[in-house]
Amino acid sequence: MDPVMDPVLEVQGVSLSLGGLTILDDLSFAVGRGEVCALIGPNGAGKTSLFNCVSGVYRPSAGRISIAGHDVTGLKPHERARRGVARTFQNLGLFPSLSVRANAMAGAHTRLHARLLPEMLAAPWARAEERALQEEADLVLDALDLGAVADTAVTALPFGTQKRVEIARALMARPALLMLDEPANGLSDGEVDELAHVVRGIRDRYDLSILLVEHHIGFVTGLSQHVVVMDVGRQIAAGTPAAVTTDPNVVRAYLGDPL
Ligand SMILES: Nc1ncnc2c1ncn2[C@@H]1O[C@H](COP(=O)(O)OP(=O)(O)OP(=O)(O)O)[C@@H](O)[C@H]1O
Ligand SMILES: [Mg+2]
């Protein structure tokens, strides 16, 4: 594989053991600036566990994770967030009863230093800051086609829309690396196409590098420049979408033979 120029994320020899089990085994890959990189593989391959290592939820048992050339392996999740890492979750991590706008604004807390967001929103001296944050959130919501539902409670929205709210929340942290865990899961074909369009739009507008976990293979091949294939914690292939989807090992382990 060609070395990635100017990597935003480097995963070098990362292994993870949990409860005596090897979950990840010596993974190495990089995500270049402005690139969409996808992680694919069967259920239980370790894709979400790798996300947890990159965002700092899990500490790898071996290896190194670097963000924009800085080793972050020992840093806590909030410290990595300050260095530009933001993610969405496979099972939504939103405040269901709050509005779409409030959920988006909550995503800014990682860069608001010592202040707690609820205090900030309640304090009279902070009205100007609140307004600025609200305006920023509204721009992000527009970029995700969520402007029309900004005042709607998240729980009242279809699942596919809620997934976009999670992306809005992550964007409010102003990340350099956005990690999306199964953003197309549960969406109709039309919604998947719309999501691909929206993700391309935010990548360009916000100058993002994206690490994507997704089972919807059309979504992956349409969006990614680089695909890493995992199976039972190991990397079994990596390369362009065209190269990995025709790789016999990948077909055998994950994609299955074409009908
Ligand atoms: N906290 C944990 N303790 C023990 N084992 C775990 C833990 N978290 C995940 N695992 C195991 O690690 C393996 C990889 O799980 P992971 O959720 O990373 O897979 P995945 O590739 O994201 O799968 P899916 O496509 O189903 O989301 C699975 O065997 C899972 O049971
Ligand atoms: Mg997963």
Image: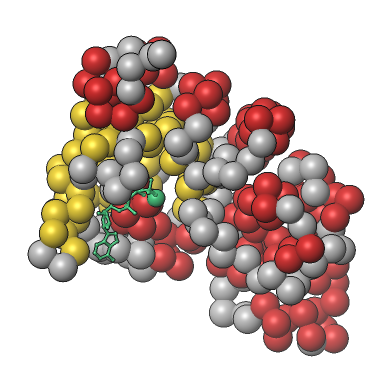
Q: Residue at x 85, y 77 (%)?
A: 127
Tell me where residue 121 appears, x and y as whole percent: 77, 80
Q: Quarter holding the N terminus?
A: top left
Tell me where residue 90 appears, x and y as whole percent: 49, 54
Question: Relative to residue 128, is residue 123 depicted above or below?
Answer: below
74 on left or right of 6: left
Residue, far front = 259
The part of the image, by quadrant, that contains residue 151 is bottom right
Is 183 in front, or is 238?
Answer: 183
Is 14 in front, or is 75?
Answer: 14
Question: Relative to residue 5, is residue 112 depicted above or below?
Answer: below
Is 200 in front, or is 163?
Answer: 163
Note whether residue 238 is visible.
no
Tell me where residue 11 appears, x and y as whole percent: 27, 42
Q: Quadrant of ligand 1?
A: bottom left
The part of the image, by quadrant, that contains residue 98 is bottom right
96 on left or right of 149: left
Q: Residue at x 74, y 74 (%)?
A: 97
Note whether residue 173 is visible.
yes
